Amino acid sequence: MNISVEPVTAPRVATTESIRLGLVEKLAYAVGKDPEHATLQDWSVALGLLVRDHVVDHWFAATRAGYSKHGKRVYYLSMEFLIGRLLNDAIANLQIEAPIIEALGELGLELKDLLGQESDAALGNGGLGRLAACFLDSMSRLAIPAYGYGIRYEHGLFRQRFHDGWQIEEAEDWLVSGHVWEFERPEVKYTIKFGGHISFDGQGQTHWHAEQTVLAVAYDTPITGWKGAHVNTLRLWSSKPTEILDLRRFNSGDYLNAAEKLIRAETISRVLYPDDTTAEGKELRLKQEFFFTSASLQDLLRRFLTEFSDLKLLPDHVSIQMNDTHPAIAVAELMRLLADEHRLPFIEAFEITRKCLSYTNHTLLPEALERWHVGLFRKVLPRHMQIIEWIDYHHLAEVQGKGLPVSLDAIRIIDHGAEIRMGNLAFIGSKRVNGVSALHTELMKQTVFSEFHKIYPDRIVNQTNGITPRRWLYECNPPLRNLLIEAIGTEWIGNLEKIDAATAFATDASFKEKFAAAKRQNKLRLAAEIKARLGITVDPSALFDVQIKRIHEYKRQLMNILETIALYHAIRRTPGAEWTPRVKIFGGKAAPGYHIAKRIIKLANDVAKVINNDPIVGDRLKVAFLPNYNVSLAEIIIPAADLSEQISTAGMEASGTGNMKLALNGALTIGTLDGANVEIGERVGPDNIYIFGLTAADVADIRIHGYDPRPTIEGDPVLAEVMRSLVSGEFSSDDNGRYHGISDVLYSGDYFLVTADFQAYFQRQRDADRDFRDSSRWTERAILNTTKVGWFSSDRTIRGYAKDVWNVPVA
Ligand SMILES: *Cc1c(COP(=O)(O)O)cnc(C)c1O
């Protein structure tokens, strides 16, 4: 259509007056409520809709500019986007907070009450999904024309509740009270096929006769960049049936079966699998991966073909990033679309594919590298099975032709005819493959992809993860944000490396005092939250020791709990000694099928109950496990932290991003030389971080030579006493045997080397106790953590991808 309506040119301006009038109007005509009867939720929706109008003005401008430049677009494919709430994020990025607060005041409302009404979009499990969300923010900040592509799960990550200390999972329903940020696009839909068989006609054409077809329907959410300079789109796919209802069956009275197809189709985007390490509900999971990947590739090809006609130009205009192997089927699907649908020769399709795609690896844990049984794969994706066989054969021949001394077994996609290795498929189909911290990338070259690295020495690059400073400082920590603005201005918000300018104030008495006051304000806010949610009273002047992340054995929450028990024993022995009061704060969900992780949660809660109720201990030690860790809770906990627990078994945490958020907000890290901790340590300096324990090289050595925990436990009276308390039922008087299993795991092998690192960890904790008592010096070191980690901005990470991987210009 050629419509000659002038587009909105200048984004609207927010004044107190325009906001007040706009709010009342939205409340009436969009929410359908009279101010007299409106609830906080109604006002929150009205405000969301109003702010959205401001976003949309910028959004249109950005989209039009994207089309007029005929440049390159970046497509970020991710199974997860852990975006959290969007209202405050949009207000902050558009810099319209002041008139909103004022207008709300005139209406007798408070912004923070309305912000609390929004549901937290939990379309992810943890770090991988949150990274995708930070990247969207930074791509908008840097005005890179980009789309995020994922799944619009009807139920995001489960809600966690504790019953008698055990984790209970409840269905999450973020869409129930309406989600104002998305625009449904019923006209943007693609057919997605599953199963069936393949036939070849005489004209060299391949036909896929599918057993099931569903529609992928687009829902768009605008992602506002800093100061609204650019707005990108997060396009999430929802699965819908191709036919609404089987009317023949319905008319014959068979209502349930008539609705069957509908249910089967909608199942695909129903739930986020609550596990980012193992593939559960295997067939459905595979269908989800193909569903969003296929829809996204069809969509980007359609967009490309509205501007160009020669598909050979695709790599000049399209860069597709695969966030982990979940979208790795893109390698075969892009080839299928190019060869089967657009009639390109296979070899040409393969060359184009390898120039468009890149792959980010997120883990070296063998059990977490996706593999699919050939039988299942062929059943769900018969044509892709053939294409993968072609790629595997073709690639092998190519490598053999080079005569390099590599193990051909290691580079096969299909492992002994039985399993498809998605990591290998992704590697072979990619232009670049990246790790997410310097250490992880190095280990990738030495382990999982060592043979590939010999063949393609330039393909593996490092892009150390980052976090967006807008959400993770500017929005979540107003006291510190205001202090920084007062001291060094606002440039750091859009360019975090400039925060180093505040280093000069680390020894300035007045700045230090204000920094400590900001921290205290945040600790009071968290203390109130702990009181409200758990009924536990904590002393805001105590050391707030924080471990928040998914519960996993490699992250070693168990080691932290054992250290808590050891400290408890020590306090009880000599309560009159000089103790540094501590509050141990935990947050995190365990995958529902991960029994040991769930028992570790129960242990933390059991230990908390005993310690918090022991009058001998009093305020010297408290333990608080906050339920339902998510982005919004992280935004409250992180600004209040003094000590950040990053204690994974060295070599197992690819990067971590929680470590960066906490350091930026002035927490000192206690951690192993793992993931990005190494790079954080390099920047804050050894005096401002507590490093301990085995290195990745030590761990690799132990993996070869074996480890016997018994002499370590028996040689350390502190640890031995802790172990006895697990077995004696000191924390489980209602069931003495509850932690025998955990004790057994630690005695018999202790794969994650908790006992091996315990003593060094305990010692570093006592160093932290001692240092915290010198509050003036501690504040200086906290300031240096904030000012020295500007490099960990996701803006820096995205600049790296733009230059080394995507080859696109940035603002
Ligand atoms: C940052 C973040 C994570 C990742 O934390 P790690 O400590 O790096 O594992 C997980 N969940 C949420 C909600 C986050 O904000």
Image: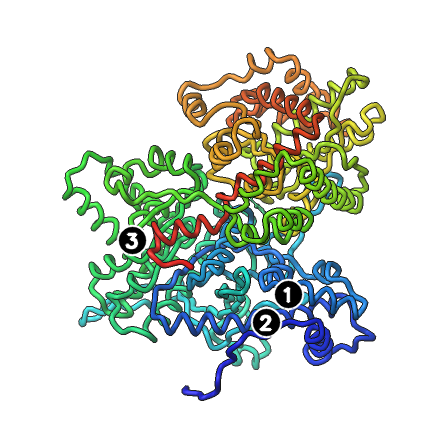
Which residue shows up at 65% across the image and 20% down it?
Answer: 723
What secondary structure is marked by label 3?
helix
Which three-letter amino acid code belongs to the residue tagged 2?
His
Which residue shows up at 62% across the image and 20% down it?
Answer: 763
Q: Position of residue 749 (x, y in %)?
A: 51, 22
Q: Position of residue 699 (x, y in %)?
A: 45, 24
What secondary structure is marked by label 2?
helix
Which three-letter amino acid code belongs to the residue tagged 1?
Ile
Taking 569 as reference, is 325 left or right? left
Q: Position of residue 455 (x, y in %)?
A: 23, 40
The residue that label 3 is drawn on is 388
Which three-letter amino acid code belongs to the residue tagged 3?
Ile
The 10 Å Cα crowd at callout 3, few under 14, some 14 to 19, many 20 or more, is many
Do the CB atoms of the residues marked 2 and 3 lie less than 8 Å apart? no
The 10 Å Cα crowd at callout 2, few under 14, some 14 to 19, many 20 or more, is some
What secondary structure is marked by label 1?
loop
Sequence order check, earlier mark of 2 and 3? 2
The residue that label 1 is drawn on is 96
